[in-house]
Image (cartoon, rainbow, N blue to C red):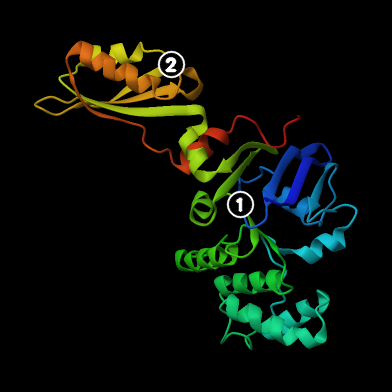
C-alpha cells in the first residue's frame, strides 16, 4: 500500500500584492525521491517553507505524516529534516560542538546524543573535520554539516533546498552521491532550478512555474511526453523535397525539418513534429511507412528519440508569465 507522507492541497501564499504560490497541490509517497523543479522565482522555496512549517500558508493546507503544518508545526518539524538554501551555521563553532547543540535543540535525550552525532558524522563524511571551526571549512563541507544537522534527529523525510548551489563540480558530485544514498531509506524532496540535479538524483519531478505546478510525474514519463509534442525522426533513401511535403500533409503533423539532404546512397533525414493528442499511438509511423511504400523510397529510419528533461523544462517554464503577475 502506497502511503502519502506529504499532502499539499490548493496551497496559496501571498506576500502583499505578490502571489508567490498559487493553488499548488501534490502528494509525496513514502520512500520517494522527488525533484521540485523550477526557475528562480517560481515559488519553490516558498512552497518548501510552508511544507516545513516555517511560514504559514495564505490559503490551502499541507499535511506531513498526517499533521497539519499550520495547526501542529512542532509535530511536523520532528518528522522533517530541512536544509534551507542558506543554512544558518555558526562559523565560530566546531563541527562536533555545533551538532551537539542541534541535538540538544532537537530534544534528543542526552544518553542518545553521542550515538546520533557519531551516526551523522559517518553518514555525511565528516570524520576528520569534527574539531574544525565551521567557518574554516570549504563550502562543500559546510553543506555536509548542513545535511548532518537536518538528519541528526533521524527524520523520515528530508527537504533539501538548492543543496549544491555554489559548489564546484567535485563537491556537487559528492553531495549528489550522498543524496542518492540517503534516498534509499528516506523520503526526499529536492528543490532546485538545476536540471542535472533532478535527473541525477530523482525518480520523479514536479515542475513549477509562476507559482503553479505545470507537470508532475516520473522523469521517464515527462521526457517521453516532451511537453505535449512528439518528435519522430525519418530516414529514407531516394526521397526528395516532395517527400518532405507529403509527410507534412499527414494527419497531426505540425512541422517537418530536414536534418540531412541525403543523396549518393545516403538517406534523406527528417525531424517530424506532431501533437501527442492528434493521433492514436504509432498512427504517424504507419502513415509514414505507407507513404514510403507508395513513393517507392527505402525507409531506413523511423523512431522517436527520447526528449531530455531540459526539453520539457524549457517548454513548460518559458517566460510567458511573470512570477509576480496578478492571478
Viewer-side residue, 17 vs 253: 253
Give the Cα separation between the discs numbered 1 and 2.
Answer: 34 Å
Q: Is residue 243 left or right of residue 315?
A: left
Foreground of the two, 324 or 149:
149
| Figure quadrant of the C terminus | top right
Per the image, label 1 sits on a secondary structure element best described as strand
Q: Determine whether 189 is above or below 304 in the image.
A: below
Q: Quadrant of residue 305?
A: top left
- Regarding residue 93, the answer to whether it shows in the image is no
Task: Identify which residue is drawn at 61% across, 52% down.
Answer: 34
| Residue 319 as seen in the image, left or right of residue 244 | right
Front-lying residue, 287 or 46? 287
Taking depth in this image into account, of 298 and 14 the one nearest to the observer is: 298
Count of all numbered marks drawn on residues in the image: 2
Q: Neighbour class for label 2 at 10 Å: few (<14), some, many (≥20)?
A: some
The outermost residue toward the left is: 264
User: Crowding near pointer 1: few (<14 within 10 Å), some, many (20+)?
Assistant: many
Task: Of the two numbered discs 1 and 2 on the same chain, state the one appearing first in sequence.
Answer: 1
- Determine which residue is flagged by label 2: 252
Question: Residue 141 location in percent, x, y?
Answer: 57, 74
Q: Secondary structure at mark 2?
A: loop
Residue 249 figure quarter: top left
Res. 264 in view = yes
**Residue beneath label 1, please?**
34
- At 78% from the left and 41% from the top, the residue drawn is 9
**Image marks 1 and 2: residues in contact by CB distance under 8 Å:** no
| Residue at figure coordinates x 80%, y 50% from the top left | 63
Amino acid at each position: 500500500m502506497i502511503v502519502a507522507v506529504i499532502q499539499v492541497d490548493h496551497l496559496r501564499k501571498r506576500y502583499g500584492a505578490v502571489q508567490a504560490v498559487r493553488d499548488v497541490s501534490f502528494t509525496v509517497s513514502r520512500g520517494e525521491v522527488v525533484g521540485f523543479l523550477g526557475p528562480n522565482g517560481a515559488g519553490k522555496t516558498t512552497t518548501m517553507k510552508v511544507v516545513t512549517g516555517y511560514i504559514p500558508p495564505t490559503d490551502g493546507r499541507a499535511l506531513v505524516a498526517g499533521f497539519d503544518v499550520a495547526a501542529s508545526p512542532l509535530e511536523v518539524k520532528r518528522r522533517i529534516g530541512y536544509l534551507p538554501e542558506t543554512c544558518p551555521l555558526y562559523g565560530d563553532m566546531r563541527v562536533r560542538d555545533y551538532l551537539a547543540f542541534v541535538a540538544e535543540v532537537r530534544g534528543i535525550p542526552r544518553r542518545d546524543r553521542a550515538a546520533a552525532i557519531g551516526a551523522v558524522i559517518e553518514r555525511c563524511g565528516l570524520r576528520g573535520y569534527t574539531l574544525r571551526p565551521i567557518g574554516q571549512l570549504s563550502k562543500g563541507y559546510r553543506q555536509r554539516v548542513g545535511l548532518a544537522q537536518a538528519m541528526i534527529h533521524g527524520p523520515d523525510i528530508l527537504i533539501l533546498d538548492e543543496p549544491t548551489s555554489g559548489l564546484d563540480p567535485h563537491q556537487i558530485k559528492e553531495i549528489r552521491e550522498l543524496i542518492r544514498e540517503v534516498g534509499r531509506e528516506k523520503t526526499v524532496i529536492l528543490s532546485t532550478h538545476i536540471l542535472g540535479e533532478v535527473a541525477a538524483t530523482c525518480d520523479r519531478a514536479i515542475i513549477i512555474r509562476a507559482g503553479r505546478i505545470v507537470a508532475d510525474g516520473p522523469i521517464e514519463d515527462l521526457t517521453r511526453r516532451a511537453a505535449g509534442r512528439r518528435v519522430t525522426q525519418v530516414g529514407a533513401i531516394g526521397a526528395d523535397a516532395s517527400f518532405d511535403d507529403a509527410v507534412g500533409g499527414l494527419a497531426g503533423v505540425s512541422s517537418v525539418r530536414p536534418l540531412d539532404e541525403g543523396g549518393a546512397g545516403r538517406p534523406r533525414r527528417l525531424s517530424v513534429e506532431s501533437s501527442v493528442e492528434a493521433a492514436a499511438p504509432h498512427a504517424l509511423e504507419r502513415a509514414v511507412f505507407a507513404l514510403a511504400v507508395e513513393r517507392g523510397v527505402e525507409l531506413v529510419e523511423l523512431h522517436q528519440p527520447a526528449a531530455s528533461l531540459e526539453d520539457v523544462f524549457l517548454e513548460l517554464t518559458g517566460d510567458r508569465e511573470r512570477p509576480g503577475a496578478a492571478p
